[in-house]
């Protein structure tokens, strides 16, 4: 069976390792230090009860060992550390390896997608091997082998199909796409919307308000994705609407949890200190807002979330402004292409 390397001992990285190991693949999990590798070997994955490392998973602190003769490397690291990690791994990559990003965020400072970050750091000859994995994948459910689906995108459909075959496992169905931009932006932007959906829940505004907020959020996501060259249809798929539903509705979502706690008046630093993982929406909101400003794109939800996180605006004020805004055509916005896009398609 093929061997797969996983860079990152995040919850999602470990979950993917367990899922693929149960399929029969040999997994090499890379820990940044020898101490971390020993801790994982000694204490296990730190996941739900009765979840242990399958025998097919080996843990190492040596990148050379982790990446030796593998079919693919999965980069399961927070978006803000993607560049650092790919720099460490790049000299060990081979022409035959798939390079799969599983991170759902944009890089602060550059507002770049993870596939762009990876491409800037690796040999151009490996660019066709870059794939992105996204979708409604709450780790706790996936590790319990509850049914889940994802989408893997690559610019070349043959590469996407190759990744699909490798990553599909029992109860984990992987679909393919060639819209890398749309799949990545869907996975990243929904985290920002989930922060706001958590605030709506935290303030007890009800399901009607939350449904409206999520729907407007999806339209805003599509507007930015289309402005960056994505297909709007991708945002109605697993990496867009699918992931948005899961992240905005589930108590297992870190971003939703942060939004709820902010609405209750808790300080952001105390909320994040109490969490075991990273809420990607916090950094992504900054990156997306900077990108929207650069593009001159109207993104009212992102703007309000940014102001809550960075300017001290109260969640109640931000959400009230969004829910009480004056109505207009629901596909309209400054520099949005959605109205003209769909009118053109209707005429054709």
Image: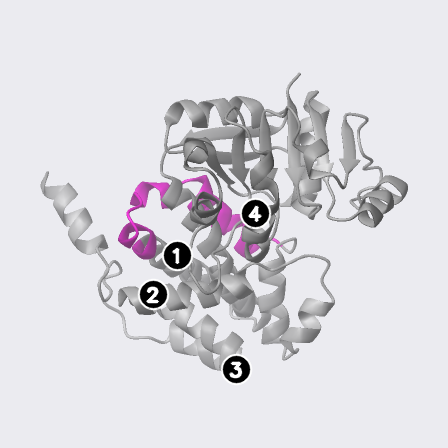
Look at the image and tell me whether residue 319 can be seen: no
Q: Nearer the viewer, mark 1 or mark 2?
A: 2
Depicted 213 relative to depicted 40: above or below: below
Q: Assess whether mark 4 and mark 2 are in contact (beta carbons under 8 angstroms).
A: no
Q: Does the magenta segment cover residue 269?
A: no
What x and y, as percent, mark residue 5? 65, 33
Determine the secondary structure under disc 4.
Answer: helix
Residue under the image location 60 percent in, 41 percent down? 89
Q: Assess whether mark 3 and mark 1 are in contact (beta carbons under 8 angstroms).
A: no
Which residue position is annotated with label 2? 292
Please state which of residues 32 and 333 is positioned toward the viewer in this rendering. Answer: 32
Determine the secondary structure under disc 3.
Answer: loop
Q: Nearer the viewer, mark 3 or mark 4?
A: 4
Mark sitting earlier along the chain (2/3)? 2
Mark 1 to mark 3 CA distance (whole Å) = 22 Å
From which residue to which does the magenta span run?
Answer: 223-250
Which residue position is annotated with label 1? 215
Mark 3 to mark 4 CA distance (whole Å) = 39 Å
Instruction: Find residue 87 and name its label.
Output: 4
What x and y, as percent, mark residue 163? 51, 27
Disc 3 residue crowd, few under 14, some 14–19, many 20+, Cα 10 Å: some
Mark sitting earlier along the chain (1/3)? 1
In this picture, residue 51 sits left or right of residue 305: right
Quadrant in which the C terminus is drawn? top left
Mark sitting earlier along the chain (1/2)? 1
Q: Nearer the viewer, mark 2 or mark 4?
A: 4
Depicted 87 relative to depicted 248: above or below: above
Q: Quadrant of residue 110?
A: bottom left
């Amino acid at each position: 069976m093929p061997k797969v390397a996983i860079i990152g001992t995040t919850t999602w990285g470990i979950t993917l390792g367990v899922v693929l190991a149960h399929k029969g693949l040999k997994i090499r999990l890379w820990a940044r230090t020898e101490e971390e590798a020993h801790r994982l070997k000694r204490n296990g994955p730190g996941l739900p009860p009765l979840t242990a490392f399958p025998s097919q998973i080996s843990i190492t602190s040596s990148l050379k060992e982790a990446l030796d003769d593998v079919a693919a490397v999965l980069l399961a690291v927070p978006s803000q550390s993607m560049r650092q990690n790919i720099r460490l791994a790049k000299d060990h990559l081979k022409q035959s390896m798939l390079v799969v990003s599983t991170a759902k965020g944009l890089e602060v400072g550059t507002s770049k997608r993870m596939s762009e970050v990876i491409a800037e750091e690796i040999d151009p000859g490996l660019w066709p091997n870059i794939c992105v994995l996204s979708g409604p994948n709450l780790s706790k459910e996936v590790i319990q082998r509850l049914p889940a689906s994802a989408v893997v995108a690559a610019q070349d459909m043959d590469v996407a199909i190759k990744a699909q075959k490798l990553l599909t496992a029992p109860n984990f169905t992987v679909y393919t796409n060639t819209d890398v931009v749309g799949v990545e932006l869907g996975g990243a932007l929904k985290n920002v919307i989930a922060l706001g959906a958590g605030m709506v829940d935290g303030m007890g505004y009800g399901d009607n308000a939350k449904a409206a907020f999520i729907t407007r959020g999806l339209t805003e996501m599509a507007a930015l994705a289309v402005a960056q060259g994505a297909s709007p249809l991708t945002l109605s798929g697993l990496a867009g609407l699918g992931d948005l539903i899961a992240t905005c509705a589930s108590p297992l979502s870190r971003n939703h949890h942060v939004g709820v706690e902010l609405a209750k008046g808790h300080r952001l630093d105390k909320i994040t200190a109490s969490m075991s993982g990273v809420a990607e929406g916090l950094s992504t909101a900054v990156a997306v807002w900077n990108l929207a400003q650069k593009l001159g794109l109207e993104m009212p939800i992102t703007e309000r979330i940014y102001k809550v996180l960075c300017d001290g605006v109260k969640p109640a004020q931000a959400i009230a402004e969004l829910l009480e805004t004056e109505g207009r055509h629901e596909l309209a916005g400054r520099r949005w292409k959605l109205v003209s896009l769909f009118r053109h398609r209707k005429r054709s």
